Amino acid sequence: MNTVLRIAGVTKRFGAAAAVDGVTLDVRENEFLALLGASGCGKTTLLRIMAGLEQPDAGQVFIDGKDVTATPPYARPVNMMFQSYALFPHMTVAANIAFGLKQDGLQGDALAARVKEALGAVELDGLGERKPHQLSGGQRQRVALARCIAKRPRVLLLDEPMAALDKHLRERTQMELKALRARLGITFIVVTHDQDEAMAMADRVAVMEAGRVLQIDTPLALYERPANARVARFFGNINLWTSSSKTMALRPERIRISHAPLTDGVSGTIENVVYLGTATTCFVKTAAGQTLRVSVPHAEGAQAFNQGDAVHLSWPASAVMELPE
Amino acid sequence: MKARSFSTTVLSFGLAFLYVPLIVVMVYSFNASKLVTVWAGFSTQWYGELLSDGQLLGAAGNSVIVALLSASLAAVVGTATGYALARFGRFRGRAILTGTVAVPLVLPDVIAGLSLLLLFVALEQAFSWMPGRGIFTIVIAHTTLTMAYVAVIVQARLVGMDRDVEEAAADLGAKPFTVFRLITLPMIKPAIIAGWLLAFVLSLDDLVIASFVSGPQSTTLPMVVYSSIRLGVSPKINALATVLIITTFVLLALAAWIGRNTLKSK
Protein backbone atom coordinates (compact mmCIF):
# COMPACT_ATOMS: atom_id res chain seq x y z
CA MET A 1 0.00 0.00 0.00
CA ASN A 2 1.17 3.51 -0.81
CA THR A 3 2.46 5.77 1.93
CA VAL A 4 0.75 9.15 1.64
CA LEU A 5 2.30 10.83 4.67
CA ARG A 6 5.56 9.97 6.36
CA ILE A 7 6.86 11.29 9.67
CA ALA A 8 10.59 10.60 9.97
CA GLY A 9 12.30 10.99 13.35
CA VAL A 10 10.29 14.07 14.30
CA THR A 11 11.03 15.78 17.62
CA LYS A 12 9.38 18.92 18.96
CA ARG A 13 10.35 20.55 22.24
CA PHE A 14 8.50 23.21 24.19
CA GLY A 15 11.12 24.56 26.56
CA ALA A 16 12.90 21.59 28.10
CA ALA A 17 10.09 19.04 27.64
CA ALA A 18 9.77 17.09 24.41
CA ALA A 19 6.13 17.09 23.28
CA VAL A 20 7.00 14.79 20.39
CA ASP A 21 10.07 12.63 20.86
CA GLY A 22 11.61 11.01 17.81
CA VAL A 23 8.40 9.77 16.19
CA THR A 24 8.54 7.83 12.94
CA LEU A 25 5.23 6.97 11.35
CA ASP A 26 3.95 5.90 7.93
CA VAL A 27 0.38 6.77 7.05
CA ARG A 28 -1.05 4.68 4.25
CA GLU A 29 -3.15 5.92 1.39
CA ASN A 30 -6.88 5.72 2.16
CA GLU A 31 -6.60 4.57 5.73
CA PHE A 32 -8.29 5.86 8.85
CA LEU A 33 -5.54 6.30 11.42
CA ALA A 34 -6.13 7.28 15.04
CA LEU A 35 -3.51 8.89 17.27
CA LEU A 36 -4.53 7.72 20.72
CA GLY A 37 -3.18 8.86 24.05
CA ALA A 38 -3.88 10.68 27.28
CA SER A 39 -3.83 14.48 27.23
CA GLY A 40 -0.29 15.83 27.02
CA CYS A 41 1.07 12.78 25.18
CA GLY A 42 1.96 14.90 22.14
CA LYS A 43 -0.74 13.67 19.76
CA THR A 44 -2.12 17.13 18.95
CA THR A 45 1.39 18.55 18.52
CA LEU A 46 2.13 15.75 16.06
CA LEU A 47 -1.06 16.61 14.15
CA ARG A 48 -0.09 20.30 14.06
CA ILE A 49 3.33 19.35 12.73
CA MET A 50 1.62 17.42 9.92
CA ALA A 51 -0.50 20.50 9.12
CA GLY A 52 2.57 22.77 9.19
CA LEU A 53 1.28 24.81 12.13
CA GLU A 54 4.29 23.76 14.22
CA GLN A 55 7.86 23.43 13.04
CA PRO A 56 9.65 20.28 14.27
CA ASP A 57 13.02 20.75 15.98
CA ALA A 58 14.30 17.64 14.26
CA GLY A 59 13.10 15.19 11.63
CA GLN A 60 11.13 15.50 8.43
CA VAL A 61 7.58 15.33 7.15
CA PHE A 62 6.94 13.85 3.71
CA ILE A 63 3.71 14.02 1.74
CA ASP A 64 3.59 11.77 -1.33
CA GLY A 65 7.33 11.33 -1.01
CA LYS A 66 8.04 15.07 -1.10
CA ASP A 67 9.77 16.72 1.87
CA VAL A 68 7.31 19.36 3.12
CA THR A 69 9.02 20.07 6.46
CA ALA A 70 9.66 23.69 5.47
CA THR A 71 6.43 24.14 3.51
CA PRO A 72 4.04 26.62 5.15
CA PRO A 73 0.52 25.38 6.08
CA TYR A 74 -1.17 27.23 3.20
CA ALA A 75 0.86 25.32 0.63
CA ARG A 76 0.32 21.79 2.03
CA PRO A 77 -2.28 19.44 0.54
CA VAL A 78 -3.62 18.61 3.99
CA ASN A 79 -6.46 20.21 5.90
CA MET A 80 -7.21 20.22 9.56
CA MET A 81 -10.46 20.25 11.48
CA PHE A 82 -9.84 22.06 14.75
CA GLN A 83 -11.20 20.91 18.08
CA SER A 84 -12.87 24.33 18.46
CA TYR A 85 -14.01 24.04 14.79
CA ALA A 86 -12.48 27.54 14.25
CA LEU A 87 -15.29 28.68 11.97
CA PHE A 88 -15.06 32.25 10.69
CA PRO A 89 -17.73 33.95 12.83
CA HIS A 90 -18.26 36.89 10.48
CA MET A 91 -18.99 34.70 7.45
CA THR A 92 -21.98 32.59 6.45
CA VAL A 93 -21.69 28.80 6.28
CA ALA A 94 -21.36 28.95 2.48
CA ALA A 95 -18.67 31.66 2.72
CA ASN A 96 -16.79 29.56 5.29
CA ILE A 97 -16.72 26.63 2.87
CA ALA A 98 -15.93 28.84 -0.13
CA PHE A 99 -12.98 30.49 1.65
CA GLY A 100 -10.50 27.66 1.08
CA LEU A 101 -11.68 27.08 -2.48
CA LYS A 102 -11.23 30.75 -3.36
CA GLN A 103 -7.62 30.53 -2.23
CA ASP A 104 -7.19 27.89 -4.96
CA GLY A 105 -8.51 30.40 -7.49
CA LEU A 106 -11.94 28.83 -7.89
CA GLN A 107 -14.82 31.21 -8.68
CA GLY A 108 -18.26 31.56 -10.22
CA ASP A 109 -20.30 28.44 -10.99
CA ALA A 110 -17.44 26.04 -10.30
CA LEU A 111 -17.06 27.51 -6.82
CA ALA A 112 -20.81 27.42 -6.14
CA ALA A 113 -20.99 23.80 -7.29
CA ARG A 114 -18.15 22.71 -4.98
CA VAL A 115 -19.74 24.51 -2.00
CA LYS A 116 -23.07 22.82 -2.72
CA GLU A 117 -21.39 19.44 -3.05
CA ALA A 118 -19.60 19.87 0.30
CA LEU A 119 -22.81 20.97 2.04
CA GLY A 120 -24.57 17.93 0.60
CA ALA A 121 -21.80 15.59 1.75
CA VAL A 122 -22.39 16.58 5.38
CA GLU A 123 -26.19 16.83 4.97
CA LEU A 124 -26.40 20.56 5.58
CA ASP A 125 -28.23 21.43 2.33
CA GLY A 126 -30.12 24.70 2.62
CA LEU A 127 -28.17 26.03 5.60
CA GLY A 128 -25.56 27.87 3.51
CA GLU A 129 -26.84 31.33 4.38
CA ARG A 130 -26.78 30.81 8.16
CA LYS A 131 -24.09 32.31 10.36
CA PRO A 132 -22.11 29.91 12.59
CA HIS A 133 -23.72 31.24 15.78
CA GLN A 134 -27.16 30.26 14.42
CA LEU A 135 -26.17 26.57 14.27
CA SER A 136 -26.18 23.77 16.84
CA GLY A 137 -22.91 22.21 18.00
CA GLY A 138 -23.39 19.19 15.75
CA GLN A 139 -24.13 21.40 12.74
CA ARG A 140 -21.05 23.52 13.41
CA GLN A 141 -18.93 20.39 13.45
CA ARG A 142 -20.33 19.46 10.03
CA VAL A 143 -19.52 22.92 8.65
CA ALA A 144 -15.94 22.54 9.85
CA LEU A 145 -15.81 19.15 8.19
CA ALA A 146 -17.37 20.41 4.96
CA ARG A 147 -14.88 23.31 4.85
CA CYS A 148 -12.01 20.80 4.91
CA ILE A 149 -13.34 18.16 2.52
CA ALA A 150 -14.38 20.80 -0.03
CA LYS A 151 -10.65 21.32 -0.62
CA ARG A 152 -10.27 17.58 -1.45
CA PRO A 153 -7.07 17.29 0.57
CA ARG A 154 -4.68 14.33 0.37
CA VAL A 155 -4.98 13.94 4.13
CA LEU A 156 -7.67 15.22 6.49
CA LEU A 157 -6.51 15.85 10.05
CA LEU A 158 -9.15 15.82 12.80
CA ASP A 159 -8.29 17.10 16.27
CA GLU A 160 -10.64 15.55 18.86
CA PRO A 161 -13.62 15.84 16.50
CA MET A 162 -16.12 14.48 19.05
CA ALA A 163 -14.93 16.46 22.07
CA ALA A 164 -17.72 19.06 21.92
CA LEU A 165 -20.55 16.68 21.02
CA ASP A 166 -23.17 15.07 23.26
CA LYS A 167 -22.63 11.43 24.06
CA HIS A 168 -25.56 10.18 21.98
CA LEU A 169 -24.37 12.19 18.97
CA ARG A 170 -20.85 10.80 19.18
CA GLU A 171 -21.53 7.23 18.18
CA ARG A 172 -23.61 8.28 15.20
CA THR A 173 -20.94 10.78 14.11
CA GLN A 174 -18.24 8.13 14.43
CA MET A 175 -20.12 5.88 12.00
CA GLU A 176 -20.78 8.79 9.66
CA LEU A 177 -17.13 9.82 9.61
CA LYS A 178 -16.12 6.27 8.81
CA ALA A 179 -18.65 6.09 5.96
CA LEU A 180 -17.64 9.53 4.67
CA ARG A 181 -13.98 8.52 4.58
CA ALA A 182 -14.78 5.42 2.56
CA ARG A 183 -16.94 7.42 0.15
CA LEU A 184 -14.44 10.26 -0.38
CA GLY A 185 -11.33 8.12 -0.51
CA ILE A 186 -9.34 10.62 1.58
CA THR A 187 -6.86 9.54 4.24
CA PHE A 188 -8.13 10.53 7.71
CA ILE A 189 -5.92 11.02 10.75
CA VAL A 190 -7.89 11.57 13.94
CA VAL A 191 -6.55 12.56 17.34
CA THR A 192 -8.47 11.18 20.31
CA HIS A 193 -8.04 10.31 23.98
CA ASP A 194 -10.93 7.83 23.89
CA GLN A 195 -9.88 4.25 23.12
CA ASP A 196 -13.44 3.17 22.29
CA GLU A 197 -13.68 5.96 19.75
CA ALA A 198 -10.33 5.04 18.23
CA MET A 199 -11.31 1.37 17.96
CA ALA A 200 -14.74 2.20 16.54
CA MET A 201 -13.44 4.39 13.72
CA ALA A 202 -9.86 3.62 12.87
CA ASP A 203 -8.27 1.01 10.62
CA ARG A 204 -5.06 1.43 12.58
CA VAL A 205 -4.35 3.05 15.93
CA ALA A 206 -1.07 4.61 17.04
CA VAL A 207 -0.88 4.52 20.83
CA MET A 208 1.16 7.44 22.15
CA GLU A 209 2.68 8.15 25.52
CA ALA A 210 5.09 10.90 26.56
CA GLY A 211 5.75 11.99 22.99
CA ARG A 212 6.50 8.50 21.65
CA VAL A 213 4.50 5.98 19.66
CA LEU A 214 4.27 2.80 21.76
CA GLN A 215 2.61 0.66 19.10
CA ILE A 216 0.80 1.12 15.83
CA ASP A 217 -1.51 -1.61 14.62
CA THR A 218 -5.14 -2.60 13.97
CA PRO A 219 -7.52 -2.35 16.94
CA LEU A 220 -7.75 -6.16 17.01
CA ALA A 221 -3.99 -6.63 17.15
CA LEU A 222 -3.60 -3.95 19.82
CA TYR A 223 -6.14 -5.74 21.99
CA GLU A 224 -5.03 -9.29 21.33
CA ARG A 225 -1.29 -8.75 20.97
CA PRO A 226 -0.25 -5.58 22.80
CA ALA A 227 3.43 -4.80 22.41
CA ASN A 228 3.85 -4.02 26.09
CA ALA A 229 2.01 -3.64 29.37
CA ARG A 230 1.38 0.09 28.86
CA VAL A 231 -0.50 -0.56 25.61
CA ALA A 232 -2.37 -3.46 27.21
CA ARG A 233 -3.49 -1.24 30.06
CA PHE A 234 -4.73 1.37 27.60
CA PHE A 235 -7.16 -1.04 25.96
CA GLY A 236 -9.73 -2.23 28.42
CA ASN A 237 -9.19 -3.68 31.85
CA ILE A 238 -6.60 -6.38 32.09
CA ASN A 239 -5.12 -8.64 34.77
CA LEU A 240 -1.38 -8.05 35.07
CA TRP A 241 1.06 -9.82 37.32
CA THR A 242 4.76 -10.44 37.53
CA SER A 243 6.12 -13.94 37.25
CA SER A 244 9.90 -14.48 37.41
CA SER A 245 10.51 -10.80 36.48
CA LYS A 246 8.21 -10.91 33.48
CA THR A 247 4.86 -9.15 33.16
CA MET A 248 2.01 -11.52 32.42
CA ALA A 249 -1.32 -10.28 31.11
CA LEU A 250 -4.71 -11.97 30.96
CA ARG A 251 -7.95 -10.48 29.65
CA PRO A 252 -10.86 -10.85 32.11
CA GLU A 253 -13.19 -12.31 29.48
CA ARG A 254 -10.79 -15.20 28.76
CA ILE A 255 -11.17 -16.63 32.28
CA ARG A 256 -13.75 -19.37 32.91
CA ILE A 257 -15.46 -19.21 36.25
CA SER A 258 -17.49 -21.99 37.90
CA HIS A 259 -18.85 -23.10 41.25
CA ALA A 260 -17.87 -26.68 40.37
CA PRO A 261 -14.18 -27.66 40.44
CA LEU A 262 -12.41 -27.36 37.09
CA THR A 263 -9.47 -29.34 35.75
CA ASP A 264 -6.29 -27.25 35.92
CA GLY A 265 -8.31 -24.71 37.88
CA VAL A 266 -7.41 -22.20 40.54
CA SER A 267 -9.72 -21.83 43.49
CA GLY A 268 -10.71 -18.60 45.12
CA THR A 269 -13.39 -16.46 46.75
CA ILE A 270 -15.44 -13.70 45.14
CA GLU A 271 -14.59 -10.42 46.87
CA ASN A 272 -16.77 -8.12 44.88
CA VAL A 273 -19.39 -8.28 42.10
CA VAL A 274 -20.00 -5.39 39.71
CA TYR A 275 -22.98 -5.48 37.38
CA LEU A 276 -22.13 -3.71 34.09
CA GLY A 277 -25.19 -4.38 31.94
CA THR A 278 -23.55 -6.36 29.16
CA ALA A 279 -21.53 -8.45 31.60
CA THR A 280 -20.79 -8.84 35.28
CA THR A 281 -17.29 -8.36 36.62
CA CYS A 282 -16.25 -10.56 39.56
CA PHE A 283 -13.15 -9.78 41.56
CA VAL A 284 -11.82 -13.13 42.74
CA LYS A 285 -9.15 -13.55 45.40
CA THR A 286 -7.24 -16.72 44.61
CA ALA A 287 -5.71 -19.10 47.12
CA ALA A 288 -2.32 -17.63 46.16
CA GLY A 289 -3.54 -14.22 47.38
CA GLN A 290 -3.86 -12.62 43.96
CA THR A 291 -6.99 -10.69 42.92
CA LEU A 292 -8.16 -11.47 39.39
CA ARG A 293 -10.82 -9.60 37.44
CA VAL A 294 -13.21 -12.00 35.70
CA SER A 295 -15.79 -10.90 33.17
CA VAL A 296 -18.92 -13.08 33.09
CA PRO A 297 -21.23 -12.58 30.09
CA HIS A 298 -24.97 -12.61 30.70
CA ALA A 299 -25.72 -15.71 28.65
CA GLU A 300 -29.09 -17.49 28.80
CA GLY A 301 -29.31 -19.66 31.93
CA ALA A 302 -25.96 -18.48 33.23
CA GLN A 303 -25.04 -19.18 36.82
CA ALA A 304 -25.38 -16.31 39.27
CA PHE A 305 -22.27 -15.37 41.22
CA ASN A 306 -22.45 -13.61 44.55
CA GLN A 307 -20.00 -12.01 46.89
CA GLY A 308 -18.38 -14.57 49.19
CA ASP A 309 -18.96 -17.54 46.83
CA ALA A 310 -16.16 -20.09 46.63
CA VAL A 311 -15.35 -20.47 42.92
CA HIS A 312 -12.91 -22.11 40.55
CA LEU A 313 -11.14 -20.32 37.70
CA SER A 314 -9.38 -21.66 34.63
CA TRP A 315 -8.03 -20.26 31.37
CA PRO A 316 -6.29 -21.63 28.30
CA ALA A 317 -2.52 -21.29 28.48
CA SER A 318 -2.59 -19.37 25.17
CA ALA A 319 -4.66 -16.59 26.78
CA VAL A 320 -1.79 -15.51 29.00
CA MET A 321 0.43 -12.94 27.29
CA GLU A 322 4.00 -12.31 28.30
CA LEU A 323 4.72 -8.61 27.90
CA PRO A 324 7.73 -6.33 28.29
CA GLU A 325 6.95 -3.33 30.49
CA MET B 1 -30.90 47.19 53.27
CA LYS B 2 -28.65 49.51 55.22
CA ALA B 3 -25.54 48.49 53.29
CA ARG B 4 -27.41 49.14 50.08
CA SER B 5 -28.48 52.64 51.02
CA PHE B 6 -24.91 53.36 52.07
CA SER B 7 -23.54 52.31 48.70
CA THR B 8 -26.26 54.33 46.95
CA THR B 9 -25.20 57.40 48.93
CA VAL B 10 -21.55 56.92 48.06
CA LEU B 11 -22.44 56.44 44.42
CA SER B 12 -24.57 59.61 44.36
CA PHE B 13 -21.75 61.66 45.88
CA GLY B 14 -19.29 60.24 43.38
CA LEU B 15 -21.53 61.00 40.43
CA ALA B 16 -22.33 64.47 41.76
CA PHE B 17 -18.61 65.17 42.18
CA LEU B 18 -18.04 64.24 38.55
CA TYR B 19 -21.06 65.74 36.87
CA VAL B 20 -22.35 68.75 38.83
CA PRO B 21 -19.73 71.10 37.27
CA LEU B 22 -20.70 69.88 33.81
CA ILE B 23 -24.39 70.33 34.53
CA VAL B 24 -23.76 73.86 35.83
CA VAL B 25 -22.01 74.77 32.59
CA MET B 26 -24.81 73.26 30.53
CA VAL B 27 -27.48 75.08 32.51
CA TYR B 28 -25.68 78.44 32.30
CA SER B 29 -25.26 78.07 28.55
CA PHE B 30 -29.00 78.78 28.39
CA ASN B 31 -28.64 81.86 30.62
CA ALA B 32 -30.07 85.09 29.20
CA SER B 33 -27.67 87.29 31.22
CA LYS B 34 -24.36 88.53 29.89
CA LEU B 35 -22.86 87.84 33.30
CA VAL B 36 -21.80 84.24 33.46
CA THR B 37 -22.63 83.76 37.12
CA VAL B 38 -26.00 85.53 37.33
CA TRP B 39 -29.11 83.68 36.17
CA ALA B 40 -31.54 85.86 34.23
CA GLY B 41 -33.93 83.48 32.55
CA PHE B 42 -33.80 80.98 29.68
CA SER B 43 -32.33 81.90 26.32
CA THR B 44 -30.55 80.25 23.40
CA GLN B 45 -28.93 83.47 22.21
CA TRP B 46 -25.40 82.31 23.06
CA TYR B 47 -25.75 79.37 20.67
CA GLY B 48 -26.65 81.89 17.97
CA GLU B 49 -23.62 84.02 18.81
CA LEU B 50 -21.43 80.96 18.87
CA LEU B 51 -22.44 80.16 15.29
CA SER B 52 -21.54 83.67 14.13
CA ASP B 53 -18.11 83.74 15.78
CA GLY B 54 -15.62 83.20 12.96
CA GLN B 55 -12.60 82.70 15.18
CA LEU B 56 -14.28 80.03 17.28
CA LEU B 57 -15.70 78.25 14.24
CA GLY B 58 -12.29 78.34 12.53
CA ALA B 59 -10.67 76.86 15.60
CA ALA B 60 -13.40 74.23 15.82
CA GLY B 61 -12.72 73.37 12.18
CA ASN B 62 -9.00 73.01 12.91
CA SER B 63 -9.77 70.79 15.89
CA VAL B 64 -12.01 68.50 13.88
CA ILE B 65 -9.46 68.21 11.05
CA VAL B 66 -6.66 67.45 13.51
CA ALA B 67 -8.82 64.92 15.35
CA LEU B 68 -9.92 63.18 12.13
CA LEU B 69 -6.39 62.95 10.72
CA SER B 70 -4.62 61.98 13.95
CA ALA B 71 -7.30 59.41 14.91
CA SER B 72 -7.04 57.79 11.49
CA LEU B 73 -3.22 57.73 11.57
CA ALA B 74 -3.33 56.41 15.14
CA ALA B 75 -5.76 53.68 14.07
CA VAL B 76 -3.34 52.49 11.37
CA VAL B 77 -0.13 52.70 13.40
CA GLY B 78 -1.79 51.49 16.60
CA THR B 79 -3.36 48.48 14.90
CA ALA B 80 -0.01 47.49 13.39
CA THR B 81 1.65 47.83 16.81
CA GLY B 82 -1.08 45.92 18.65
CA TYR B 83 -0.94 43.15 16.04
CA ALA B 84 2.83 42.87 16.31
CA LEU B 85 2.67 42.66 20.10
CA ALA B 86 -0.12 40.07 20.13
CA ARG B 87 0.84 37.86 17.19
CA PHE B 88 4.53 37.99 16.32
CA GLY B 89 5.63 35.90 19.29
CA ARG B 90 8.92 36.78 20.93
CA PHE B 91 10.61 38.90 18.29
CA ARG B 92 13.70 41.02 18.85
CA GLY B 93 12.89 44.15 20.79
CA ARG B 94 9.43 42.97 21.85
CA ALA B 95 10.07 43.80 25.53
CA ILE B 96 11.19 47.31 24.59
CA LEU B 97 8.15 47.83 22.38
CA THR B 98 5.77 46.55 25.07
CA GLY B 99 7.28 48.98 27.56
CA THR B 100 7.45 51.98 25.26
CA VAL B 101 3.90 51.59 23.94
CA ALA B 102 2.59 52.28 27.44
CA VAL B 103 4.75 55.38 27.93
CA PRO B 104 2.46 57.90 26.20
CA LEU B 105 -0.39 56.68 28.43
CA VAL B 106 1.41 57.84 31.57
CA LEU B 107 3.77 60.55 30.29
CA PRO B 108 2.70 64.04 31.48
CA ASP B 109 1.34 66.07 28.56
CA VAL B 110 3.70 68.93 29.39
CA ILE B 111 6.72 66.69 28.90
CA ALA B 112 5.29 65.15 25.72
CA GLY B 113 4.50 68.60 24.33
CA LEU B 114 7.89 70.02 25.21
CA SER B 115 9.86 67.13 23.74
CA LEU B 116 7.82 67.17 20.54
CA LEU B 117 8.32 70.94 20.24
CA LEU B 118 12.09 70.48 20.61
CA LEU B 119 11.99 67.74 17.97
CA PHE B 120 10.05 69.90 15.51
CA VAL B 121 12.32 72.90 16.08
CA ALA B 122 15.37 70.69 15.55
CA LEU B 123 13.84 69.27 12.35
CA GLU B 124 13.14 72.77 11.12
CA GLN B 125 16.71 73.89 11.78
CA ALA B 126 18.26 70.79 10.27
CA PHE B 127 16.04 70.21 7.24
CA SER B 128 13.87 73.37 7.12
CA TRP B 129 11.01 70.90 7.43
CA MET B 130 7.64 72.16 8.57
CA PRO B 131 8.65 75.83 8.97
CA GLY B 132 6.68 77.63 11.66
CA ARG B 133 4.73 74.49 12.47
CA GLY B 134 0.99 74.15 11.91
CA ILE B 135 -1.85 71.70 11.80
CA PHE B 136 0.36 68.89 10.60
CA THR B 137 2.70 69.09 13.60
CA ILE B 138 -0.33 68.86 15.90
CA VAL B 139 -1.55 65.84 13.93
CA ILE B 140 1.82 64.11 14.39
CA ALA B 141 1.94 64.99 18.08
CA HIS B 142 -1.59 63.71 18.68
CA THR B 143 -0.90 60.54 16.72
CA THR B 144 2.08 59.66 18.91
CA LEU B 145 -0.13 60.10 21.97
CA THR B 146 -3.28 58.32 20.79
CA MET B 147 -1.76 55.42 18.85
CA ALA B 148 -0.78 53.93 22.21
CA TYR B 149 -4.46 53.74 23.18
CA VAL B 150 -5.39 52.07 19.89
CA ALA B 151 -2.47 49.62 20.24
CA VAL B 152 -3.55 48.62 23.75
CA ILE B 153 -7.20 48.10 22.73
CA VAL B 154 -6.31 46.11 19.60
CA GLN B 155 -3.76 44.00 21.45
CA ALA B 156 -6.29 43.16 24.16
CA ARG B 157 -8.83 42.09 21.53
CA LEU B 158 -6.29 39.92 19.70
CA VAL B 159 -5.09 38.25 22.89
CA GLY B 160 -8.70 37.38 23.74
CA MET B 161 -9.28 35.95 20.27
CA ASP B 162 -8.73 32.30 19.43
CA ARG B 163 -5.68 31.80 17.23
CA ASP B 164 -7.43 28.72 15.84
CA VAL B 165 -9.48 30.84 13.48
CA GLU B 166 -6.42 32.44 11.88
CA GLU B 167 -4.62 29.09 11.78
CA ALA B 168 -7.64 27.51 10.10
CA ALA B 169 -7.53 30.21 7.41
CA ALA B 170 -3.84 29.52 6.82
CA ASP B 171 -4.55 25.79 6.74
CA LEU B 172 -7.24 26.39 4.11
CA GLY B 173 -4.64 27.96 1.83
CA ALA B 174 -4.61 31.66 2.72
CA LYS B 175 -1.23 33.42 2.75
CA PRO B 176 -0.41 35.51 5.85
CA PHE B 177 -1.55 38.84 4.39
CA THR B 178 -4.80 37.32 3.12
CA VAL B 179 -5.43 35.88 6.59
CA PHE B 180 -4.94 39.34 8.08
CA ARG B 181 -7.15 41.07 5.51
CA LEU B 182 -10.04 38.59 5.37
CA ILE B 183 -10.06 37.07 8.86
CA THR B 184 -8.13 39.09 11.46
CA LEU B 185 -9.13 42.58 10.31
CA PRO B 186 -12.91 41.96 10.24
CA MET B 187 -12.69 40.32 13.66
CA ILE B 188 -10.77 43.20 15.29
CA LYS B 189 -12.71 45.90 13.44
CA PRO B 190 -14.82 46.83 16.49
CA ALA B 191 -11.64 47.29 18.56
CA ILE B 192 -10.14 49.50 15.86
CA ILE B 193 -13.32 51.62 15.67
CA ALA B 194 -13.44 51.94 19.47
CA GLY B 195 -9.75 52.94 19.43
CA TRP B 196 -10.38 55.46 16.66
CA LEU B 197 -13.24 57.07 18.59
CA LEU B 198 -11.13 57.28 21.73
CA ALA B 199 -8.25 58.81 19.76
CA PHE B 200 -10.65 61.32 18.20
CA VAL B 201 -11.96 62.43 21.60
CA LEU B 202 -8.47 62.63 23.12
CA SER B 203 -7.27 64.78 20.23
CA LEU B 204 -10.33 67.03 20.32
CA ASP B 205 -9.76 67.49 24.02
CA ASP B 206 -6.06 68.23 24.11
CA LEU B 207 -4.87 71.69 25.13
CA VAL B 208 -1.36 71.19 26.49
CA ILE B 209 0.38 69.33 23.66
CA ALA B 210 -1.38 71.37 20.98
CA SER B 211 -0.26 74.62 22.67
CA PHE B 212 3.36 73.48 22.47
CA VAL B 213 3.47 72.29 18.88
CA SER B 214 0.96 74.55 17.09
CA GLY B 215 1.90 77.38 14.78
CA PRO B 216 0.32 80.83 14.48
CA GLN B 217 -2.32 79.78 11.93
CA SER B 218 -3.34 76.57 13.60
CA THR B 219 -5.20 77.36 16.81
CA THR B 220 -7.41 74.56 18.03
CA LEU B 221 -10.67 74.94 19.89
CA PRO B 222 -9.38 74.19 23.43
CA MET B 223 -6.65 76.81 22.87
CA VAL B 224 -9.21 79.46 21.88
CA VAL B 225 -11.43 78.61 24.83
CA TYR B 226 -8.54 78.75 27.26
CA SER B 227 -7.23 82.07 26.02
CA SER B 228 -10.70 83.66 25.89
CA ILE B 229 -11.32 82.70 29.52
CA ARG B 230 -8.26 84.66 30.55
CA LEU B 231 -9.77 87.72 28.89
CA GLY B 232 -13.09 87.27 30.69
CA VAL B 233 -15.65 84.56 30.24
CA SER B 234 -18.41 85.03 27.73
CA PRO B 235 -21.51 82.83 28.09
CA LYS B 236 -20.72 81.81 24.52
CA ILE B 237 -18.02 79.62 26.00
CA ASN B 238 -20.65 77.84 28.08
CA ALA B 239 -22.61 77.10 24.94
CA LEU B 240 -19.45 75.84 23.26
CA ALA B 241 -18.60 73.72 26.28
CA THR B 242 -22.07 72.18 26.18
CA VAL B 243 -21.64 71.25 22.53
CA LEU B 244 -18.21 69.73 23.27
CA ILE B 245 -19.45 67.82 26.32
CA ILE B 246 -22.32 66.30 24.34
CA THR B 247 -20.05 65.41 21.40
CA THR B 248 -17.52 63.78 23.69
CA PHE B 249 -20.20 61.85 25.57
CA VAL B 250 -21.79 60.56 22.40
CA LEU B 251 -18.44 59.41 20.98
CA LEU B 252 -17.33 57.75 24.24
CA ALA B 253 -20.71 56.06 24.63
CA LEU B 254 -20.39 54.82 21.05
CA ALA B 255 -16.88 53.49 21.75
CA ALA B 256 -18.09 51.73 24.91
CA TRP B 257 -21.14 50.30 23.15
CA ILE B 258 -19.03 48.93 20.29
CA GLY B 259 -16.53 47.53 22.78
CA ARG B 260 -19.27 45.77 24.74
CA ASN B 261 -20.89 44.31 21.64
CA THR B 262 -17.50 42.96 20.63
CA LEU B 263 -17.20 41.11 23.90
CA LYS B 264 -20.72 39.72 23.57
CA SER B 265 -20.25 38.42 20.05
CA LYS B 266 -17.10 36.61 21.17
Image (tube, coloured by chain):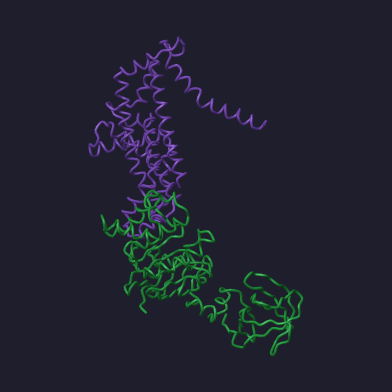
Chain colours: A green, B purple
Residue A76 occupies quadrant: bottom left
Q: Is residue B19 left or right of residue A298?
A: left
Quarter of the rendering occupied by the N terminus of chain A: bottom left
B126 to B94, vertically: above or below: above
Residue A85 occupies quadrant: bottom left
Image point (28%, 26%), residue name = B216
B188 to A143, vertically: above or below: above
User: Residue B253, image x and y in percent?
Assistant: 44, 33
Residue B129 seen anywhere in this rendered image of the structure: yes
Is residue A188 or residue A254 the one in the foreground?
Answer: A254
Q: How many marks?
A: 0
Quarter of the rendering occupied by the C terminus of chain A: bottom right
Q: Which residue appears farthest toward the front when viewing the image?
A: A300
Image point (55%, 28%), residue name = B14
Q: Which residue appears farthest toward the left when viewing the image?
A: B128
Q: Is residue A14 left or right of residue B60?
A: right
Residue A229 occupies quadrant: bottom right
User: Residue B220, image x and y in percent?
Assistant: 33, 27
Is residue A42 or residue A234 the one in the foreground?
Answer: A234
Q: Which residue appears farthest toward the bottom when viewing the image?
A: A263
User: Residue A252, image x and y in percent?
Assistant: 63, 78
A10 to B255, vertically: above or below: below
Image point (73%, 87%), residue name = A261
Residue B232 seen anywhere in this rendered image of the structure: no
